[in-house]
Image: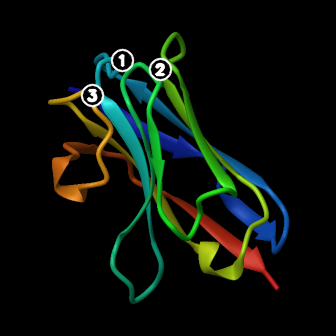
Amino acid sequence: QGQLVEAGGGLGQAGGSLRLSCVASGRTFRSSAMAWFRQAPGKEREFVATISGGGGTTYYGDSVRGRFTISRDNAKNTVYLQMNNLHPPATAVYYCAADLNAARATTIVARYDYWGPGTQVTLSS
């Protein structure tokens, strides 16, 4: 039984940076596409970024492209989300997810089988 646990959330400033991490345990996720999603209060879950199993392919949501970077270290079973130039819409719970059935990166939320409990990111004005 695998588990994903996010860390690195907290209070950030508009224009500042935060780095989230997602540590996988209990099983290997090295062949799995991994992704970050976020959900703000009263809104639907939004795709943020995804990375293929080998790390060679990444996709980003329109609202974060050019400011956020997803990466992974398979030796550490960890996926990262570097968030730069934060904007207020970044206030949300950020979730890490894994697609156990494919290494190919996908933006489709229904493809992801494992989810972490989420970490809160809040931007101060």
> Where does residue 95 sit, x and y in percent of width and height?
43, 55
When asked about the image quadrant of residue 29, the answer is top left
**What residue do we see at 51% from left, 67% from top?**
62
Q: Position of residue 11 (x, y in %)?
A: 75, 67
Amino acid beneath label 1: Arg
Which mark, residue 124?
none
Instruction: Please report whichever mark, 2 or 1, sits nearer to the chain's N-terminal start.
Output: 1
Up-down relation of residue 120 to residue 83 (above or below): below
Q: Indicate whether 92 appears above or below 71.
A: below
Q: Amino acid at mark 2?
A: Asn
Mark 2 and mark 3 lie on one chain; the one further toward the N terminus is 3
Position of 1 with respect to 32 (left or right) is left
**Residue shown at 36%/17% (left/top)?**
30
* Foreground: disc 2 or disc 3: 2
On screen, residue 36 versus residue 82, left or right, reads left
Q: Residue furthest bottom?
A: 42
Secondary element at tag 1: loop
Q: What residue does disc 3 label?
A: 2
Residue type at tag 3: Gly
What distance separates the C-alpha of mark 2 from that of mark 3?
Answer: 11 Å
Discs 2/1, front = 1
Image side of residue 29 versus residue 73, left or right: left
Count neighbours of disc 1 (C-alpha within 10 A) and say few if under 14, some if 14 to 19, many if 20 or more. Answer: many
Residue wearing tag 2: 77
- At which x and y percent is residue 108? 24, 55
Mark 2 and mark 1 in contact? Answer it, CB < 8 Å.
yes
Quarter placement of the N terminus: top left
**Position in image of residue 54 (x %, y %):** 41, 19
The residue beneath circle 1 is 30
Residue at the location (45% across, 47% down)? Answer: 59
